[in-house]
Image (cartoon, grey):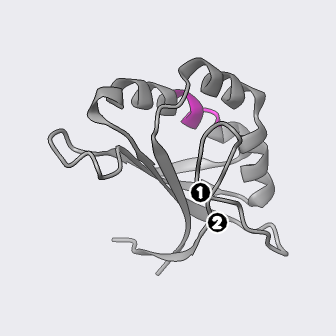
Amino acid sequence: MTEFFVQKAIPVNDGSRASSATVTETETDEPFTLAFLGYGPEAGRRAAHAYEDAVLALLPDHGARVVYRGCRAEGEDEALPLEVHLLWFPGRTALTAYLADDRRAALRAGFGDVFARTEVVTVEER
């Protein structure tokens, strides 16, 4: 089993919702993995899953991929994340391009805020 540990929390604010994240600056553009946590109520489960189905499909266009995607089990506490992802990027420029993708922005506009809160953490294999 592959283990991951937290390297550094990096809040990401794409301008469309409140978030505690900002992408950190690095001197190199080397591959890295992000853990994404999206929090939301059970009532928003279908919309959140549909939005993530659509935006995660854009990752390969930026050389990125989904390593793991899971969701909160039905009946679990709504204070826990609704969606949990591990995402691999070939470098920070790929993440920046993904976040700026016009198709992603259009999906955000169409779906609205599907999460009440998000967290993004850079993780490293251990």
Left-right relation of 77 to 98: left
Q: Say what amino acid the circle numbered 1 marks.
A: Trp
Considering only vertical position in the picture, is 123 above or below 67? below
Viewer-side residue, 9 vs 18: 18
Quadrant of the rendered image containing residue 59? top right
Q: Which residues are magenta?
A: 54-58
Q: Residue furthest right?
A: 27
Q: Secondary structure at mark 1?
A: strand
Considering only vertical position in the picture, is 14 above or below 55? below
Q: Residue furthest left?
A: 75
Q: Earlier in the sequence, mark 2 or mark 1?
A: 2
The spot of residue 96 in percent (x, y) is 77, 50
Left-right relation of 116 to 90: left
Distance Cα–Cα, label 2 vs label 1: 6 Å
Quadrant of the image containing the N terminus? bottom left
Q: Are marks 2 and 1 in contact (CB under 8 Å)?
A: yes
Instruction: State the predominant SS element of the stretch in magenta.
Output: helix
Q: Say what amino acid the circle numbered 2 marks.
A: Phe
Residue drawn at point x = 59 percent, y = 57 percent: 88
Residue designated by label 2? 32
Residue designated by label 1? 88
**Magenta highlight on residue 56:** yes
**Magenta highlight on residue 55:** yes
How packed mark 2 is, by other alpha carbons closer than 10 Å (few <14, some 14-19, many 20 or more), is some
The spot of residue 7 in percent (x, y) is 56, 77
